[in-house]
Image (spheres, helix red, strand yellow):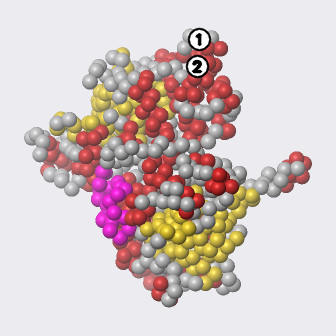
Amino acid sequence: MDRDNRPLLRMLEVSRDFDVSRPWLNRVLEGAPRQLLRAVDGVSLAVKRGETLALVGESGCGKSTVARLIVGLYATSQGRIEFDGIDLAAPGASALRRRMQMIFQDPYASLNPRWRVRDIVAEPIRVLKLAASEHEVGARVAELLRQVGLVAEDGEKYPHEFSGGQRQRISIARALSGNPEFLVCDEPTSALDVSVQAQILNLMTDLQQRLGLTYLFISHNLAVVSHIADRVGVMYLGRLVELADAEELFVRPLHPYTRMLLDAIPDLEMSGKARTPVAGEVPNPLDPPAGCAFHPRCLHANARCRSERPQALVRGEAVVACHAVEERRI
Amino acid sequence: MSAPLLEVKDLRVEFPTRRGTLVAVDGASLAIAPGEILGVVGESGAGKSLTGMAIIGLIEPPGRIAAGEIRLESERIDGLPYEQMRRIRGRRIGAIFQDPLTSLNPLFTIGEQLTETILAHLEVTPAEALARALALLAEVGIPAPRARIGHYPHQFSGGMRQRVVIALALAAEPRLIIADEPTTALDVSIQAQIIALLKRLAREHGTAVMLITHDMGVIAETADRVAVMYAGRIAEIGPVRDVIHAPRHPYTAGLMGSIPKLGQGAGKKRGRLVQIEGAMPRLNAIPAGCAFNPRCPRRFERCLAERPELIAIGTTDAACWLYADGPR
């Protein structure tokens, strides 16, 4: 692979366990065992420069944990994450994290209410010493605020003076202030009203084109993902079950879980298309089913699905982990 | 349409504050027929939940119904004394809220909560109440109801909890159900199950449902008619198909355009979403004339000065001066 085509970010067989054991005293007195919850289970993916890769899935599927692993808010339990070809766990690699930033879901919780907006946006500039003087900091903040559709005077205000959509613009300005190449966006529009969501999605598209940004976009909303993503990864119970070009995935989904998710979306066009009823719920992640994690809800499951865990299978541009697809049963 | 089961006329909900009175719902009128699902859609602060709360008589003081009337089966129910209203709630109007955990008491089993509700509203023996509770749980799709009836709310998943809440709302066979964002806290696959359940119940029992949500997709799937609310007023109301495919009010049109849709090309071929500039006004700063006028791409002088009432345009009614001289 030549250098220009090298992915900006790669995850190689990354897993993350959380210790959810009872307290030590209970374990000693009651003989309760240690209990680990595997939130992310052997996820491998690559994000290309300049693209938007979306991760979708239902609550508890591990998509937000992936986001936090990448930006370093959690450490990996197993596997490796490379940014620009360098292992992020290697000594000295933490400087690489300056090149990535994160946007969070809740614009009410992610901005310090006691700080003026100009200080919120300026903090990364000051910490990373990206400006020579305070005057330069001020000019940069004003430019950033204009870039996200606010005005320079808004810098004097406090977060509570803004609506949800405007706060998310402030979050984006703060994320951009460190000149990152890579933005990890964890449900950036889920807390917003639909007309405001459209404004933020349009802004993110514009900024990507203008600044050549690469996005990892985490969302549970498939319609939003189909609008913003170039490629889409579908997660289920900590595992990546399918990864494909967005156009391909929404027209010809391969994995039965992807098919089920697409079938479950309310149909705005009211075409009256026949749909497979969705059955069952996501199983308890503390006790995931053997074999393929989706088999208890899958219409195509057989004995192999119940015992053997499917490996990632390359199908053209797509990657899918499903025995039924491999055996050409569906 | 048969005689409406619920009729709301010129409802006005006010909140007096030190800095003046805030009008959260301003002259909303709507009607629901038996067996009909009316969707009420709008963005946060549009007044859709307060309209529902006014109907079940649960506006928190100092908020109050300042004007208008609410009729259930032709009988006025606004301004009833607390005790009388309490008997109507549950018996004749059931309620389903967004978060199933706050609607259930964590200290009682779901069986206790169901039989208590049934015994409070219907004249049955405890044994009959238990049988009815089991039948209700089966009806809302809880597997093995006999085994589950002794469980506490925390032992159920989110989707199953919402089914229990629906069973509770149905316990006394109410004629009307107010469902306020019943699927918002749920995953999309569970949402599809709950929507199917609500539709089946309305059809089989002839229960009228007022479905309050911000999600146009849920409305499209579920509702027969839809009311679009904006800044405390109804901007447009009509059959769901017409409102979605041929929106009359510029706000509805903008709202529909701003929803990302599947199957419109993905990745680099996508276009921009339609964008309504600005945000909904705060209650203390609702503009004169049409409340939508500062954001409206089609406003003219009359919109700044005069407030439009609902005007019939074919099958839908829209509160917009564009249609003052008939449809265009």
The span picked out in magenta is B255-276
Depth check: give the residue in front, B300 or A176.
A176
Q: Is residue B128 left or right of residue A255?
A: right
Chain letter of the residue beneath label 1 in the structure image: B
Q: Is residue B101 left or right of residue B44?
A: right
Q: At which x and y percent is residue A172?
A: 45, 68
Q: Quadrant of residue B139?
A: top right
Secondary structure at numbered mark 1: loop
- Distance from disc 2 to disc 1, alpha carbons, whole Å, reads 10 Å
Q: Which residue is rendered at x = 51% and y = 25% of the image? A: B170
According to the image, label 1 marks what residue? B124
Label disc, if present, on residue B132 of the rendered structure: 2
Chain letter of the residue beneath label 2 in the structure image: B
Q: Are marks 2 and 1 on the same chain?
A: yes
Q: Which residue is rendered at x = 59% and y = 51% of the image? A: A301
- Of label 2 and label 1, which has the lower sequence position? 1
Closer to viewer: mark 2 or mark 1:
2
**Magenta-drawn stretch, dominant element (helix, strand or loop):** loop
Is residue B278 visible in the rendered image? The answer is no
Q: Is the Cβ of the residue at disc 2 closer than 8 Å to that at disc 1?
A: yes
Q: Which residue is rendered at x = 29% and y = 19% of the image? A: B3
Check the image and report above or below for B211 versus A125: above
